[in-house]
């Protein structure tokens, strides 16, 4: 039962962080006129990652809240940097190189990101250490 609530909260937090990420991506492409979708996405991911950390620590993974936030932030940053590089590389390949839909590519990359980040957060970053 706890896992179901955790997954529900994770989905809500992920939707918010994804909206932040996607919003910044669109600002970078449409308003700031980035020539590379991959680079625009990489920069936008920083805003999404920050939003995700705050939500995961204080809303999703309650049992991990007592742990020092700095240690979690370092582990979170390492995990999300790797995932952001994967997401950015995929977007570069999909949109810049293959010239396929930015929006569909974002959905595919985000589904992969969701899976990897939930497992990493649950099993490594915000795990209950007691």
Image: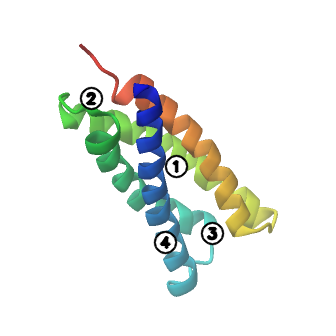
Q: Which of 128 and 24 is in front in this view?
A: 128
The answer to whether 114 appears left or right of 7 in the picture is right
Q: Is residue 43 shown to the viewer in this render?
A: no
Residue 79 located left or right of residue 87: left
Q: Where is residue 3 in the image (x, y as percent from the top left)?
A: 44, 27
Which numbered dot is residue 37? 3
Which label is found at residue 23?
Answer: 4
For the residues labelled 3 and 2, the Cα–Cα distance comes to 35 Å
Task: Measure the alpha-carbon separation of dots 3 and 4.
Answer: 13 Å
Mark 3 and 4 residues: CB-CB less than 8 Å, in contact? no
Tell me which label, 2 or 1, sits earlier in the chain. 2
- Residue 82 image position (x, y, % from top left): 51, 41
Whether residue 111 is visible to the viewer of this picture, yes or no, is: yes
Residue 84, above or below 40: above
Task: Kindly report the distance in space between the C-alpha atoms of the residues bearing marks 2 and 4.
Answer: 29 Å
- Image position of 89 with respect to 71: above or below: below
């Amino acid at each position: 039962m706890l896992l179901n609530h955790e997954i529900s909260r994770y989905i809500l937090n992920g939707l918010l962080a994804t909206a932040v990420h996607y919003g910044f991506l669109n600002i970078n492409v449409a308003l700031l006129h980035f020539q590379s979708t991959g680079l625009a996405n990489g920069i936008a991911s920083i805003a999404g990652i920050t939003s995700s950390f705050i939500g995961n620590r204080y809303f999703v993974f309650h049992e991990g809240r007592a742990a020092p936030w700095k240690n979690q932030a370092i582990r979170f940053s390492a995990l999300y940097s790797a995932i952001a590089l994967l997401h950015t590389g995929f977007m570069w390949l999909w949109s810049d190189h293959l010239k396929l839909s930015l929006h569909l590519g974002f959905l595919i990359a985000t589904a992969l990101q969701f899976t990897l980040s939930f497992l990493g957060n649950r099993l490594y970053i915000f795990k209950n250490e007691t």
